[in-house]
């Protein structure tokens, strides 16, 4: 495997060491504060990424009855996965480059969605917010720690509704977790084990990747240059597109970026975890400088926060990389709102499903992913406490309705960039540990990795390609 983009290990380290902080570039648009739609108006939404998960986002927003779909944008309008949306909205303008879409229809657009690969959330969101448009992006927010920082700054400056697609933040688990924290049921948490053990796309290579894949002819229907967006040039290869981008450190955030937000979201917010002081690669099976490991265990250490004690979060991924389960765990958490892992085998019912165990000084909780609720274990303790548990309020709106109502000024985004950004940055730090197979010390005040210059440079990542620099200035 080879490519014109030179990423030998030695060159990678030299290049990474040489990265400098991105300087101020003139932003692509003048600042424009978003104007909320009036209560009776529908929100005009332009959609970037119209297949696979992007299609799910479009369908979810449209089903609320609160929006009009006014533009469809996808870098490969000839791909099979775009067909359903093109048939559903046959008269809606179509684009392959989001910049051209915004230039032509900006005055007609209230909000933008980014149901696209992790790395290309950033330029779409930054352009939209800079033009005063509300923005909905899938998780994780962006590819690098610095990009997430800039997106949080832009949300605050332009006063837009900015939602990260983390459905559990509008489902039962969100309201239960908050109610249980407020009632003192969840308190003094010192350890959380989180796990996602389904097969992943890169497992098919068994860690045997010696370089980036060889150049192939670009499909005639694909705008490869726009697909790459700000990422340094790579030759086209089929192993980058249609979901396989998640395999590669240069493009994706692996299983942690894919599932970490769905599993850890409520614990991170309501336990006020913020950013860690230490991130360690505890176990790396099949470590590779190009693709994610076959299995990994990561440790994130968070300091005491006010009256809350220090807490360690351990993350487990890989088909057979399970944490030790507490006595009385019972059956795996199975919930209808937890989709099967994409690109790999579905976790069998008798195996550990995606989820977490939360350890406090006197109680242990088990939970799944997305909106699945927590339960107290062992079952006997749960029955003993049943009458003392607080009533959990119902969600007033699902995640898509919450976003559109926020665009209209009627609700606030529950998974706003302000809330989702620090969680996404925790995941970005974990990806650096996976990439370098190291232990990192992180200074929460300076927001720097203090013991590893290569790791610290990866907070920003490589400089953007020429023509994409302007998105790095708020």
Image: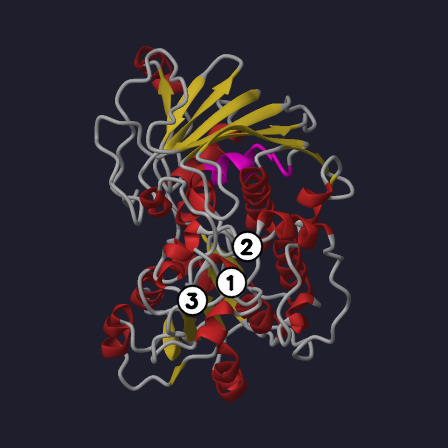
Select label 3 or label 2 by which is in front. 3
Stretch of the chain drawn in magenta: 264-275
> Is residue 45 visible from the viewing direction of this image?
yes
Image quadrant in which the N terminus is located:
bottom left
Q: Which residue is mark 1?
A: 121
The scheme the figure's colours follow is secondary structure
Give coordinates of residue 393: x percent, y percent: 40, 40
Q: How many marks?
A: 3
**Residue 178 against residue 212 in the figure, above or below:** above
Left or right, 253 with respect to 439, comes to left
What is the distance, in whole Å, between disc 3 and disc 1 at their CAs? 25 Å
Q: Which residue is mark 2?
A: 143
What is the distance, in whole Å, between disc 1 and disc 2 at their CAs? 8 Å
Give coordinates of residue 209: x percent, y percent: 43, 47
- Front residue of 255 and 382: 255
Select label 3 or label 1 by which is in front. 3
Left or right, 409 with respect to 173, comes to right
Give coordinates of residue 109: x percent, y percent: 48, 79
Dot 3, crowdedness within 10 Å: few (<14), some or many (≥20)? some
Task: Looking at the image, tell me whether mark 3 or mark 1 is earlier in sequence order.
Answer: 1
Task: Looking at the image, tell me whether mark 1 or mark 2 is earlier in sequence order.
Answer: 1
Task: Looking at the image, tell me whether mark 3 or mark 2 is earlier in sequence order.
Answer: 2
> Residue drawn at (53%, 80%), measured in percent from left and top?
99
Dot 2, crowdedness within 10 Å: few (<14), some or many (≥20)? many
Q: Which residue is mark 3?
A: 215
> Residue drawn at (47%, 43%), measured in percent from left and top?
261
Q: Are marks 1 and 2 in contact (CB under 8 Å)?
A: yes
């Amino acid at each position: 495997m080879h490519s014109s983009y030179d990423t030998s290990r030695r060159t990678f380290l030299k290049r990474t060491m040489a990265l400098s902080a991105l300087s101020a570039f003139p932003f692509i648009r003048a600042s424009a504060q978003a104007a909320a739609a009036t209560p009776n108006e529908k929100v005009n939404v332009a959609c970037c990424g119209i297949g696979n998960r992007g299609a799910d986002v479009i369908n979810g927003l449209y089903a609320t009855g609160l929006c009009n779909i006014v533009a469809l944008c996808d870098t490969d309008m000839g791909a099979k996965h775009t067909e359903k949306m093109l048939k559903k909205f046959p008269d809606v303008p179509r684009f392959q480059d989001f910049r051209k879409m915004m230039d032509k229809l900006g005055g007609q657009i209230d909000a933008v969605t980014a149901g696209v690969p992790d790395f290309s959330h950033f330029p779409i969101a930054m352009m939209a917010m800079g033009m005063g448009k509300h923005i909905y992006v899938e998780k994780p927010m962006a590819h690098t720690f610095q990009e997430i920082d800039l997106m949080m700054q832009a949300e605050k400056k332009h006063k837009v509704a900015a939602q990260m697609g983390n459905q559990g933040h509008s489902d039962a688990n969100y309201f239960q977790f908050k109610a249980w924290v407020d009632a003192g049921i969840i308190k003094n948490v010192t350890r959380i084990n989180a796990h996602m053990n389904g097969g992943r796309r890169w497992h098919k290579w068994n860690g045997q990747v010696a370089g980036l894949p060889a150049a192939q002819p670009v499909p005639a229907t694909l705008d490869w240059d726009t697909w790459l967006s700000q990422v340094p040039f790579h030759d086209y290869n089929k192993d980058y597109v249609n979901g396989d981008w998640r395999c590669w450190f240069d493009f994706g955030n692996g299983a942690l970026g894919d599932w970490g937000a769905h599993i850890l979201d409520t614990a991170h917010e309501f336990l006020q975890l913020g950013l860690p002081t230490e991130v360690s690669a505890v176990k790396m099976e099949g470590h590779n400088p190009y693709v994610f490991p076959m299995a990994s265990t990561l440790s994130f250490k968070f300091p005491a926060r006010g009256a809350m004690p220090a807490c360690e979060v351990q993350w487990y991924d890989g088909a057979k990389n399970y944490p030790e389960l507490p006595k009385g765990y019972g059956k795996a958490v199975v919930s209808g709102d937890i989709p099967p892992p994409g690109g790999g085998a579905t976790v069998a019912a008798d195996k550990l499903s995606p989820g977490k165990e939360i350890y406090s000084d006197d109680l242990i909780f088990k939970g799944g992913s997305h909106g699945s609720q927590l339960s107290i274990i062992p079952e006997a303790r749960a029955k003993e406490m049943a009458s003392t548990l607080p009533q959990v309020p119902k969600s007033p709106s699902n995640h898509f309705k919450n976003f559109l109502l926020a665009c209209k000024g009627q609700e606030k985004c529950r998974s706003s960039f302000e809330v989702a950004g620090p969680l996404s940055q925790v995941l970005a730090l974990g990806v650096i540990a996976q990439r370098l197979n190291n232990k990192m010390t992180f200074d929460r005040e300076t927001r720097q990795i203090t013991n590893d210059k290569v790791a610290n440079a990866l907070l920003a990542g490589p400089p953007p390609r020429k023509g994409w620099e302007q998105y790095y200035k708020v």
